Amino acid sequence: MRALVPGQTIHQRYHILALAGRGGMGAVYAARDGHLGATVALKQTLASDEVLRRAFRREARLLAALHHPALPRVLDHFEDAGELFLAMEYVPGDDLGARLAQRRVPFSIEDVLAWADTLLDALEYLHRHTPPVIHRDIKPQNLKLTHVGKIVLLDFGLARGTAGGQTLQLSGATLTGYTPHYAPLEQIQGGATDARADLYGLGATLYHLLAGAAPADALARGVARLNGDPDPLRHLCDLRPAVPRALGEAVMRTLALRAADRPASAAELRASLRAIAAGSADEDIESAADGPTGASTRRPSERRWLWGVPVLAVGLAVSIGVAGLARPTAATASSSPSANAERAPVVVPSSPSPLPPTMTATVTAMPSSTTDASATARAALPTATATEPPSPTEPPSATRVTRPQPTARPHAQPTVRPRPTAVPTAAPAPVPIIPGP
């Protein structure tokens, strides 16, 4: 097969720009379409048999009829100097194989699941055709991301429009097309392949993207089984424990050596991966709710108790403030008469009463009805109590109760002028002070 060089023109239409990739079955070039003025991917394929040429032309027409967002459009096919060419839509950028080598770490589980969903939709579209279109070469090197992040499946060089295998005749030798590590055992052996061969290739690709390492070759695994040795394929979750077990099991099922042990269709595998993705999202939500900010997971009774705490605190603060106002009033009774006349809200008697009445001011804060602990707190609220002796002009049994005014401010104390007849002739006896809480 001849090598094309930049500046060379093929088929009097396509001007070679650069080599995009080379494999055992041919090469891919970036070329300029002189008729359309667009950049295309020019696929050069090995073929020397007339039967294969007719099959190539038939399948090129079949691929040109495909229309799916994850598949490049086939624009043209032709033969030049005994070689077959397929002109396809060009997708710029690095493939996932090159990106994986640059990153040196696996891709995120969320990204891989999203790509798998799109690729399985494309495979389902291909496999529904009559006859089914089998790609037969799914691998990271044939996957590209567009500038908007969409995944595209490239390189239909090994695609077949039948369910049979593909063998190419080259100089009298038989060459079977496949890529190691991504091809199933039946394809390596040159046997019949169907849609489950593409599922093996996709599973091997997902394994590589998630684990960062390609799976063991199917041929080596088959030999190990024949010899009674353990399967050299390591479980995906052993290589990357962060992968959910259900996802690891689904990928490992696609890598079964027997086609009958794999998922029956792309639709079945897609439904399984979607259920796994939905379950992983639910687990992430539950984990986030159980964290430091997960107050929404408290039981209703706990939430009601928490709402009752601020109400109880407000009630205690109000009670303590009222008690604080009552203590200075009682303390002023032991000062001089003139000071008591200006500050105390009671009249100083000429002689202590044997049974002094008391003045009681009680403020009770009603806590929220949503808490059960508020009943106990209501009984424990403090009260403010002060002793007021009777006035000299009143009978000893008379009791004056001074109630706090709602509009009175804490610093505004009422002024009571002494009566002329209530001037004491001797120093009054100290008034007992009942300590506050």
Image (cartoon, rainbow, N blue to C red):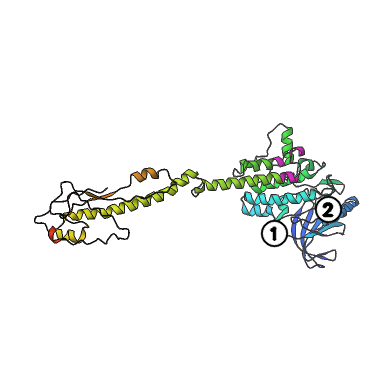
Q: Is 135 left, or right, of 382 in this rendering? A: right
Mark 1 secondary-structure assignment: loop
Q: Residue furthest top?
A: 228
Closer to the camera: disc 1 or disc 2? 1
Q: Residue at x 37, y 43 (%)?
A: 376
Q: Nearer the viewer, residue 296 or 117?
A: 296
Q: Which residue is mark 2?
A: 46
* Residue count near mark 2 (Cα–Cα under 10 Å), binned few <14, some 14–19, many ≥20: many
Verify CB contact (< 8 Å) between mark 1 and mark 2. Answer: no
Q: Nearer the viewer, residue 222 or 415?
A: 415
Measured from the top left, where is residue 40 in percent x and y?
Answer: 77, 62
Q: Is residue 266 magenta?
A: yes
The quarter of the picture where residue 265 lies is top right
Image quarter in which the N terminus is found = bottom right
Q: What residue type is disc 1 on?
A: Thr
Bounds of the magenta segment: 253-269
Q: Is 107 left, or right, of 426 in this rendering? A: right
Which numbered tag is attached to residue 146? 1
Does residue 329 appear anywhere in the picture?
yes
Q: Residue furthest front?
A: 395
Q: Nearer the viewer, residue 158 or 420?
A: 420
* Chain-order first, disc 1 or disc 2: 2
Judge whether 37 appears above or below 81 on screen: below
Measured from the top left, where is residue 111 in percent x and y?
Answer: 64, 52
Q: Residue at x 34, y 44 (%)?
A: 379
Does residue 214 appear anywhere in the picture?
no
Mark 2 secondary-structure assignment: loop
Q: Nearer the viewer, residue 194 or 263?
A: 263
Measured from the top left, where is residue 24 in percent x and y?
Answer: 78, 51
Q: What residue type is disc 2 on?
A: Leu
Measured from the top left, where is residue 252 in percent x and y?
Answer: 68, 41
